[in-house]
Amino acid sequence: MDFNALPFDSDAMCAGLRPWIECESPTHDAAAVDRMIDLASYDLAAMGAAIERIPGRMGLGGSVRATFPHGKAGEPGILIAGHMDTVHPVGTLAKLPFRREGGTCWGPGIQDMKGGNYLALEAIRRLAAASIATKLPVTVLFTPDEEIGTPATRELIEATARGQKYVLVPEPARPDGGVVWGRYAIARFNLRTIGTPIHAGVDPRLGRSAVREMARRILEIEEMSTDSCTFSVGCVVSDQRHVNCVPSGCSAEALSMAKRQADLDAGVEKMLALNNPDGDVGFHVARGVTRPVWEPSAADKALFEHAKSLATDLGFEITAHMAGGGSDGNFTGAMGIPTLDSLGPRGAGLHTLNEHIEIESLAERGKLMAGLLATLS
């Protein structure tokens, strides 16, 4: 079957992607994410899918699960799993508007990962228009919270994936255009320091600064990084809004990443050992969400080899990678379900004000996705 013959049009796909990019959807703005889920739900319904809207929880937005008509409906099939939340706050469009110049298109979330989600739907559209039936039923699941570790929808993702034969994740392509067949383990931590306030105009040395202690702890934590397990701290917020007061509280979040689960487990123990709530300035460490390590299985590797063969037939090569950064593929891969990640467009600058994609890769990767959907059995 010649999937190159399918009439994918990168320019048309880029234009169709624009409403998605201009619907800003930062994770912590539930209403904004729900507006994006509404857009995707409409598109899926217009394609003939049965739509299930799943309410959000933990103050986050909802999800959409869509199933397409198939003669084997209800049997194990293919799950396309993507997230619709981004790291960019509402208003980012003023600094990073949707725009294209030559072969490049910019916009918040265009690479991570609305571009990949869109091309996955376009692959389903092109197959349907060509009357090419997939051998397996297809389910699409779009969720609202991947950028914060998927605290609200991990169970939903795992429950949906459990009945599938394959999972395809259209996260951004690797820098060389490759895909991902495994990801490192990740743990998040919530940090808090509790000090003693005093008016800074009296004598700040008589107080105990929660900010000063957090600064000291940040250096301590980041110095724990090794080749096998790394630590970083971000999102530091002081309770104190006035500089003339010694701050009594400060919060932060830390992230740890390891290539092996055993190394992450050891890193978690090191972090929790720093807990010292009864010190001169109290330091509290609480474990947050965790992504398990996903080590490529024989089935993951076989799925990659199948994709590699399809890509070769389409005129390009793909490589396979273990990757950091984490995705919802961590969960399905760790469950032992054959998973292939980073099937989205090529680009760069994700999570920055230079986030962009290479427009021609929309059709390129769309054809690869179509080939996978049509041939997996």
Image: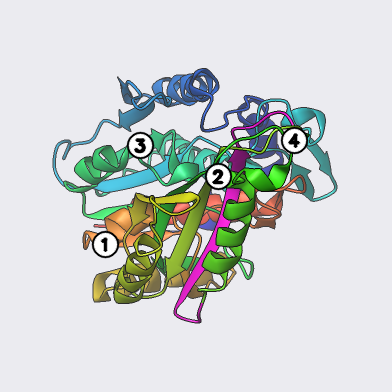
What's the distance in space between the residues labelled 3 and 2, CA to CA?
Answer: 13 Å
What's the distance in space between the residues labelled 4 and 3, CA to CA?
Answer: 58 Å
Q: Is mark 1 on a helix, strand or loop?
A: helix
Checking the image for residue 141, the label placed there is 3
At label 3, the amino acid type is: Leu
Q: Is mark 4 on a helix, strand or loop?
A: loop
Checking the image for residue 202, the label placed there is 4
Q: Mark 1 or mark 2, which is nearer the start of the sequence?
A: 2
Say which quadrant the N terminus sits in: bottom left
> Which dot, 4 or 3, sits closer to the camera?
4
> Which dot, 3 or 1, sits closer to the camera?
1
Q: Residue 272's x, y, as percent?
A: 35, 60
Mark 1 crowdedness (10 Å alpha carbons): few <14, some 14-19, many ≥20 = some
Residue at the disc numbered 2: 113
> Which dot, 2 or 1, sits closer to the camera?
1
> Quick check: 83 left or right of 173?
left
State the extent of the magenta-drawn residues as a range: 226-242
> Quick check: 33 left or right of 139?
right
Q: Residue 72's x, y, as percent?
A: 16, 40
Q: Which residue sits at x=64%, y=54%?
A: 361
Please state which of residues 39 and 285 is positioned toward the viewer in this rendering. 285
Q: Is mark 2 on a helix, strand or loop?
A: helix
Residue at the disc numbered 1: 334
Q: Mark 3 or mark 4, which is nearer the start of the sequence?
A: 3
Q: Is mark 3 on a helix, strand or loop?
A: strand
What's the distance in space between the residues labelled 3 and 1, CA to CA?
Answer: 18 Å
- Residue 49: image quadrant is top left
Residue 9 appears in the figure: no
Q: Mark 2 or mark 3, which is nearer the start of the sequence?
A: 2
Q: Residue 114's x, y, as percent?
A: 56, 39
Q: Mark 1 or mark 3, which is nearer the start of the sequence?
A: 3
Question: Is residue 142 placed above or below 234 in the rendered structure?
Answer: above
